[in-house]
Amino acid sequence: MVFSIILASVVLAILAANTVLELSRDLMMFQQNSYRAERYRRWLSESKDSTSLWRLAGIIILFIGLSTLSRPFGALALAGIFGLASAWSLSHRKYKKPLVWTARARRIYAVALLLAIAICGACVALFDHGETFEILYTASLTLLGCYCGSHLIIVAANFILKPVEKAITARYCNDARRRLESMPDLKIIGITGSYGKTSTKHYLHRILSEQFDTLMTPGSFNTTLGVVRTIREYLKPYNEVFIVEMGAKNVGDIKEICDLVHPTMGIITAVGPQHLESFKTIERVQATKFELADALPADGVAIVNDDFEKIADRPVSNAECLRYGVHAPKAAYRAENIKYTPMGTDFTIAGPDGWNLNLSTRLMGEANVSDLLAAAVAAHTLGVDDRKIAAAVASIEPVEHRLSVKRTPGGITILDDAFNSNPVGSRMALEVLGSMKDGKRIVITPGMIELGAEQYELNFQLGETIGRNVDVAIIVGEYNREALAEGVRASGRLPEDKLHLVASFAEAQKVLASIVAKGDTVLYENDLPDTFK
């Protein structure tokens, strides 16, 4: 009997550790889905994580345990072995974007653990007969059940905390509003777009810093709470300009940020097929991005990119509207005479009233030219001297993972465009790669995500672009494999032995190591998060 109790105690401890680790992993994925239950459920459906081999094995062992209550030692041993193997696997996994232990994450995790403990306590109270072994055995099976249903526990914990989170959010937002109201002279510039907004934010910040004390939202702080956090933690009374990046995955997201900060200038960099899984249609994307322009006051200024059809055909009547573009001949501000050199890019901005500004930058690619154009127009509108604009543009370093250029000691050129690939940006990056004349041109990519019903077609088109511009293509993962591979083949240019289909980034690196040589150029296009395989 003593041995039975010791065995049950050890198995209980193992299963408890396994459940704790699994809840942490589930919370990480919940966080990557923006703490949104509907997105998390969609990810579960697409990833099949709730019916993974680990989860199915746990369910089978749970049923074995429930069906052999009279002779439980075999089931207990199975549960212990399973829990040990699962816990070891969970503790040794590496993630591209690990869990960030924010205050909200800690609250959800604490409630999830309490729910698991409460479930164990309830099952023990209902089903054991008061003997120590039976208590331990029932608790062990319950913890195994909690592991199998850990997704539900995380969602339930988030639901329980909704009133708490709502109250905390309201308090933080009110505090941010008070801080902004205390700075009536602060110029607030909003930047949004399907893509290009982060780069434009960085470029504008660098240019405006030549003349103003300027703050921008850091990193990917482009949600309402990210903006609130920036205001509460970073905004200083002496700041003169506040640049606010505004992201959106649902209609109303931009308006919510505008209602908080009340921008007087807004830049819309692009309207394209990004996040179509949540927006459903390009018209809804357009309406959401233009929430920024619609929020501007009568004396405000909207700066919009007419290279995109869904921007060019959208009037702005509530504020002054300055239109720019690389391929929009009717735009007021245009990038002309674009020349790519080994040192970067030279181009000229042609504007109203004969305004011309020659710029040189270390950045490469048409996307960067477009983003620099938007930033320069905004700075010019705010009265920044042309010489300051040119000097700032010349000193701008590439934003990490956004078509930045690196050269290895072995003579290999790396084009790093790993952040958040999109149809326009990925095409431009591949065209830059295609312009390279020395050595092999190699691309490593898993394709693009969150494109809704157009997922296959747009990745097929990306594959065709790959086929036309590279000498070797390495396709990573399974999510877009078929569409990309078929697109590459449809281009009719790339031989089959130059198309490599691999399961992981680590495998891609092994393939690359076996073929790369001095003088080659390697493009890393997109890096999917852990929510995609």
Image: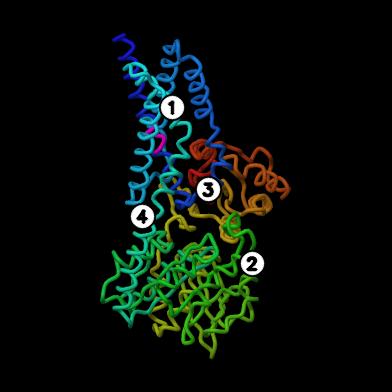
Rendered location of residue 366, percent (x, y): 56, 66
Write the start and end of the magenta stretch as one range.
19-23
Query: SS at mark 3?
Result: loop
Q: Mark 4 points at which residue?
A: 164
Q: Nearer the viewer, mark 1 or mark 3?
A: 1
Choose the circle earlier in sequence order: 1 or 3. 1
Choose the circle earlier in sequence order: 2 or 1. 1
Residue at 29% x, 75% y is 239
Quadrant in which the C terminus is drawn: top right
Determine if residue 413 is in view.
no
Closest to the observer, 526 or 264: 264
Closest to the observer, 419 or 144: 144
Query: SS at mark 2?
Result: helix
Check whether the beta carbons of the residues at disc 2 and disc 3 lie within 8 A of each other: no
Q: Name the residue under label 3.
A: 520
Q: Mark 2 points at which residue?
A: 283
Residue at 33% x, 64% y is 172
Left or right of 401, for residue 284 = right
Dot 1: within a 10 Å radius of its alpha carbon, few (fewer than 14), some, or many (20 or more) residues?
many
Q: Is residue 21 magenta?
A: yes
Q: Mark 1 points at which residue?
A: 144
Q: Which of marks 3 and 4 is in front?
A: 4
Mark 2 residue type: Glu
Marker count (numbered): 4
Instruction: Give me the disc on residue 387.
Output: none
Q: Nearer the viewer, mark 2 or mark 1?
A: 1
Closest to the observer, 458 or 116: 116
